[in-house]
Amino acid sequence: MNYSKCLFFSLVVLIHTENTAHADRNFLWHKINENCVPGYINKDTYQPCSLVDINEKIAIYKVDNDKYQYLLLPTDKVTGIEDDKLQKNNSPNYLYNAWLAKTFLTERLGKPIKERFISLTLNAKNARSQDHIHISCLSNSANKIISKIPEREIDTDWSKKQITIPPYSFYYRKISLTELMNSNLFKSVAEKVKKEQGKLEYTGVGLINRNSDTFIILAGIGTKSKGVSAERIQDHECELAEQ
């Protein structure tokens, strides 16, 4: 085989391998359930995860190619926001546990960051490659847009109009820390999506802190041709740190 054919063959194998990895939606789930969870049970270690909590049924995983971003992955098989398991009253509180896991992000940053510059997001089924909650910094542009919402328009009921955080639009409502700790917010999102005649599988969700007791939850309702990648409101380089 000459050099050109050998190089071509190598490239084909490489592309096939990368595409197969990206096509496997369960890649990370297999990693935590075949490595992190057994490692914790048998050896009392978390690797390659940062944390495994058997009681809360979660694992925290540092994103391989990002400096600061972490992910929360359920140890149970949960496909995403559209999964019926999330609508049950006894479902683990994944959002609150993801918020608690922000300490991994802040420690890795190695510099101060205000809590209101930390966010959680979930992408729609047709706008994600894996099934998890993103724990990362809020983008500067998203923060500016959200900060301009008049206080009188932020209520515990879902907004009637949407705010646009390019390239998506989101309904929003205020929640307290107590509600985050004790309520199933996925049910609230599902009710809003149903009211707007949308589908959960095309919906992206964001959670943003505003002060010690106040959060804003976002629900962006997409379509079959364009699901909402709520992760776009985040900045994995954490530009807002130290501001």
Image (cartoon, rainbow, N blue to C red):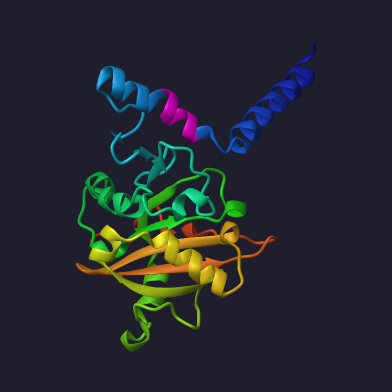
Instruction: Give the image location of residue 234, x and y in percent.
Output: 42, 59
Instruction: Find the residue positioned furthest to the top.
Output: 1
Q: Is residue 56 above or below residue 33?
A: below
Report the residue at 41% width, 51% height from top. Answer: 134
Q: Is residue 40 visible?
A: yes
Q: How many marks are shown on the rendered structure? A: 0
**Which residue is nearer to you in this view: 171 or 142?**
171
Query: Based on the displayed image, in which of its 4 quarters is residue 10 positioned?
Result: top right
Instruction: Give the image location of residue 223, x and y in percent.
Output: 65, 64
**Which residue is nearer to you in this view: 207 or 186?**
186
- With 182 as the anchor, is 133 left or right in this view? right
Q: Is residue 166 visible?
A: no
- With 221 as the anchor, is 138 left or right in this view? left
Residue 200 inside the magenta-drawn segment: no
User: Magenta part of the protein: which range?
Assistant: 28-34
Screen quadrant of the C terminus: bottom left
Instruction: Give the image location of residue 142, x and y in percent.
Output: 42, 69
Report the residue at 75% width, 24% height from top. Answer: 8
Residue 32 inside the magenta-drawn segment: yes
Q: Is residue 65 above or below residue 191?
A: above
Screen quadrant of the N terminus: top right
Instruction: Give the image location of residue 111, x and y in percent.
Output: 21, 52
Report the residue at 35% width, 54% height from top. Answer: 95
- With 220 as the anchor, is 41 left or right in this view? left
